[in-house]
Amino acid sequence: MAEQRVKETVVIIVGGGPSGLATAACLSNLSIPYILLEREDCVASIWKKYTYDRVHLHLAKQFCELPLLPIPSSYPTYLSRMEFVQYLNDYVSHFRIHPIFRQAVEAAAYDEVAGKWNVKARDSGTGSDEVKEYRSRFLVVATGESCDASWPEIEGLQSFTGDILHSTQYKTGEKFKDRSVLVVGSGNSGMEISLDLANYGADTSVVVRSPIHVLSRTMTSLGLVLLKYLSLYWVDSLLVMMSKIVYGDLCKYGIERPKEGPFAMKDKYGRYPVVDVGTYQKIKSRQIQVLPGINRIRGTNVLFEDGKEYAFDAIVLATGFKRSTKAWLKGDEYLLGDNGLSKRSYPNHWKGLNGLYCSGLARKGLYGAAMDAQNIAQDINTVL
């Protein structure tokens, strides 16, 4: 293999999702040179390629804006997938962001002698053995909370004779009309996919294995505003009270509320409350059946922990994501944990050692990613 010339810059950003784009814009605004590496063939690939059609932002648009470019006032309060994608495309054009696509990072290590980060990336699109090398003084990990699809270990899953797909492969419930579908996972994706399936006439069931909080969009946005003025305890207490008034006793539908508050659980465990956009009414009317954890699968039959067994035509795994960051990031024991998320406490979660940073990896959503990007750019600027 011919020797490749090393591309050198001040900052390398790994990841072309909203976190990486926000960081690039903030660096550009301060005239700090950077290279942005993205393993897919487009920016924001989760939004453009791996998200179901009906998805909308669950938070009001003011909590989802990236730095330095507001979401247009003509856009609705809760953006659709295509509206948010258009905003991101406009963001890229406005700040003249030019990622290097199809660059799957295989290794990133800090050279103590040179005081630089050495990054090696392989072309993820052609299957080529060519490895390109990059070098920078600073490295920003912006690979996102939603990175690689996570497939659960369920006894007998491989024996299932119907259709199996991960939520990243699901687009619409249209082809599932009159079919019996089991959704595994009760986070926001699982609940909204269940709603979509029910709306298209599928016989829909959803596995709710653990206690969850159910909030409306208004409650969630109100909570974010109140956190600026009240303690987390009081905000959580208010939201739980409001949820009980609006949704009543969820236990009779197979859903338990956690003992800890919704924002406390998000901060501690990264478990977001379910932002209800209509699923609750479908559950209440029994158009969506709530089932407990799965014991095992045999053929088309699924046995649940309560001893009941049902047959399904398809299974949708809304089982979230995992991150492979620790597989390629060498020598960092300070900033990121084994799960690929920041293990440092807020508000210093974004800064590591030797010029290492992370953006959007603190379970703070788009709002947190925007703040991370600004902090990182300002911090780098003070050093240069």
Image: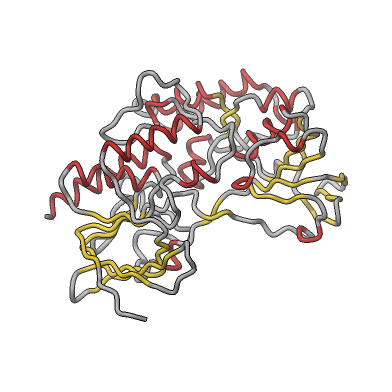
Q: Is residue 333 left or right of residue 114?
A: right
Between 121 and 146, the one lying in front of the other is 121
Question: Which of the 4 image quarters holds residue 285?
Answer: top right
- Counting from the top left corner in percent of width and height, residue 335 is at 35, 59
Q: Determine the residue positioned at 38% across, 46% down.
A: 360
Between 38 and 365, the one lying in front of the other is 38
Between 125 and 37, the one lying in front of the other is 125
Figure check: 249 above or below 40: above
The quarter in which the C terminus is drawn is: bottom left
Question: Which of the 4 image quarters holds residue 298?
Answer: bottom right
Figure check: 297 above or below 233: below
The quarter in which the N terminus is drawn is: bottom left
Q: Determine the residue positioned at 26% across, 40% down.
A: 95
- Counting from the top left corner in percent of width and height, residue 333 is at 37, 66
Check the image and name the residue furthest to the bottom. Answer: 1
- Counting from the top left corner in percent of width and height, residue 379 is at 19, 49
Figure check: 329 above or below 321: below
Q: Determine the residue positioned at 45% across, 29% down.
A: 83
Q: Is residue 133 left or right of residue 294?
A: left
